[in-house]
Image (cartoon, rainbow, N blue to C red):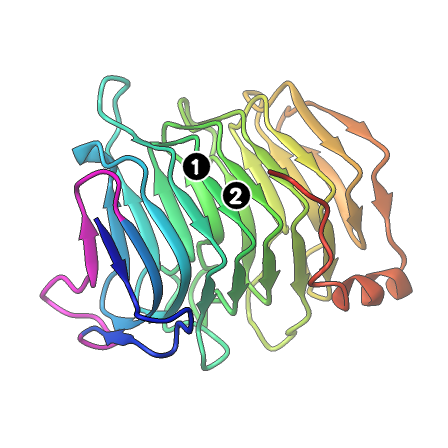
C-alpha cells in the first residue's frame, strides 16, 4: 500500500491531527500494523501522541517513509513500538529517507519527545533526513532525534543533519541487556548552537550497544555538555569509532571499550566551518 501526495511537493497535502497537546484519546495520524506500507510526499502535523506508529508487535516490516515533513507532535514523531522478550516479533527493513522532522517554534512542547524512537527494529535505514529543535523546554532532557533500542539490531543511520536537538543519535539505553547490537552511524552532521535550550547531551551515544561502528561524522556543539561522542557500559564492546571530526571529546564511560582510529578534535574555527557544511556527504549506500 502506498499513500502519497499527488506531487513531489510535500507541502501540497497537509494532514493535521487533534493538536500538539496532551489528550485522553490517542492521537496518531498513521498507525501501521501491516507490512510493505509506503508514505510519501506529505506533511503530517499536530498530534497528541505520534505522527506515525509502526507496530513491531504486529510484525510490520518493510515500512518506507520518503519526502514527508513531520511537524509538532506532543510525543515522538515516528514510533516503532514493541515490547521486551526475545521471542516477540520485530519490525525489519524499514527505510526513512529525505524527510524533515521539526518543532517549528524552535523547541518542543515537553521532554517526552523525539524524532524517531524505535524498539525491536532490525536492518532499518535512516538516510538524508533533517531534524530540527528536538529539544525539551523543562524538567528533563528530550529523547533523541534518532534512537534505536530495546532488542534493535543492525540499523544504519547515515548522512542526516541534526540541528539544535538535545540528543542527536542514540543506540541502546542504560545498562540493560538486549538493547542494541551492531549497526552503523556514519556521515551525519550534528550541530547544537542554540544556547537558549536548557538541556543537552552528547551528539552520539552508545549505551549497551556492542559491535557498532561510528565513522565519518561531524559534530559541532556550542552547549555546556563537554563530550561529542560517548560510549557507555561494559556491554558496549567491539565498537569502532573512526574518522569523526568534533569540537568536543570522545569519551568512554562505565567500562565501555572501543577502537578509536583517526578521530580529530576540531578547534573552534573548524567547528564553525562544520556548521556550514550541511549538504556535503560521502556516499553510504
- The spot of residue 129 in percent (x, y) is 53, 57
Question: Would you say 79 lies left or right of 147 here?
Answer: left
* Residue shown at the point (21%, 58%) measured from the top left: 30
Q: Which residue is mark 1?
A: 124
* Residue shown at the point (38%, 60%) measured from the top left: 113
Question: Would you say 285 lies left or right of 120 here?
Answer: right
* Residue shown at the point (72%, 38%) measured from the top left: 251
- The spot of residue 70 in percent (x, y) is 38, 67
- Picture disc at residue 170: 2
Does the CB distance between marks 2 and 1 fall below 8 Å? no
Does the stretch in magenta take in 34?
yes
Q: Quadrant of residue 68?
A: bottom left
Residue 65 or residue 110, whichever sits in front: 65
Q: Earlier in the sequence, mark 2 or mark 1?
A: 1
* Residue shown at the point (67%, 35%) measured from the top left: 214
- The spot of residue 234 in percent (x, y) is 58, 21
Residue furthest to the front: 6
Q: Name the secondary structure under disc 1.
A: loop
Q: Quadrant of residue 41?
A: bottom left
Residue furthest to the left: 25
Residue 66 lies, with reference to residue 275, above or below; the image says above
Q: CA distance from mark 2 to mark 1?
A: 14 Å
The boundaries of the magenta stretch are 18-37
Amino acid at each position: 500500500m502506498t499513500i502519497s501526495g499527488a506531487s513531489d511537493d510535500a507541502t501540497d497535502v497537509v494532514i493535521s491531527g487533534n493538536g500538539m497537546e496532551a489528550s485522553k484519546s490517542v492521537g496518531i495520524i498513521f498507525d501501521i500494523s501491516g507490512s510493505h506500507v509506503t508514505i510519501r510526499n506529505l506533511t503530517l502535523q499536530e498530534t497528541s501522541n505520534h505522527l506515525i506508529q509502526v507496530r513491531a508487535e504486529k510484525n510490520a516490516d518493510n515500512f518506507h517513509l520518503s519526502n514527508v515533513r513531520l511537524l509538532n507532535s506532543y510525543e515522538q514523531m515516528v514510533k516503532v513500538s514493541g515490547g521486551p522478550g526475545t521471542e516477540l516479533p520485530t519490525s525489519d527493513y524499514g527505510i526513512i529517507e529525505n524527510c524533515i522532522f521539526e518543532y517549528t517554534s524552535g523547541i518542543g512542547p515537553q521532554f517526552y519527545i523525539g524524532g524517531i524512537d524505535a524498539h525491536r527494529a532490525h536492518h532499518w535505514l535512516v538516510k538524508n533526513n533533517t531534524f530540527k529543535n528536538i529539544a525539551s523546554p523543562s524538567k528533563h532532557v528530550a529523547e533523541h532525534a534518532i534512537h534505536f533500542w530495546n532488542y534493535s539490531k543492525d540499523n544504519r543511520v547515515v548522512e542526516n543533519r541534526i540541528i539544535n536537538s538535545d540528543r542527536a543519535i542514540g543506540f541502546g539505553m542504560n545498562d540493560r541487556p538486549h538493547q542494541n547490537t551492531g549497526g552503523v552511524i556514519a556521515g551525519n552532521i550534528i550541530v547544537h548552537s542554540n544556547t537558549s535550550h536548557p538541556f543537552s547531551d552528547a551528539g552520539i551515544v552508545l549505551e549497551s550497544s556492542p559491535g557498532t561502528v561510528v565513522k565519518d561524522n561531524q559534530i559541532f556543539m556550542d552547549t555546556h555538555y563537554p563530550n561529542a561522542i560517548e560510549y557507555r557500559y561494559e556491554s558496549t564492546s567491539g565498537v569502532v569509532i573512526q574518522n569523526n571530526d568534533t569540537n568536543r571529546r570522545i569519551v568512554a564511560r562505565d567500562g565501555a571499550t572501543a577502537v578509536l582510529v583517526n578521530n580529530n578534535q576540531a578547534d573552534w574555527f573548524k567547528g564553525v566551518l562544520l556548521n556550514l557544511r550541511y549538504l556535503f556527504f560521502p556516499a553510504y549506500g
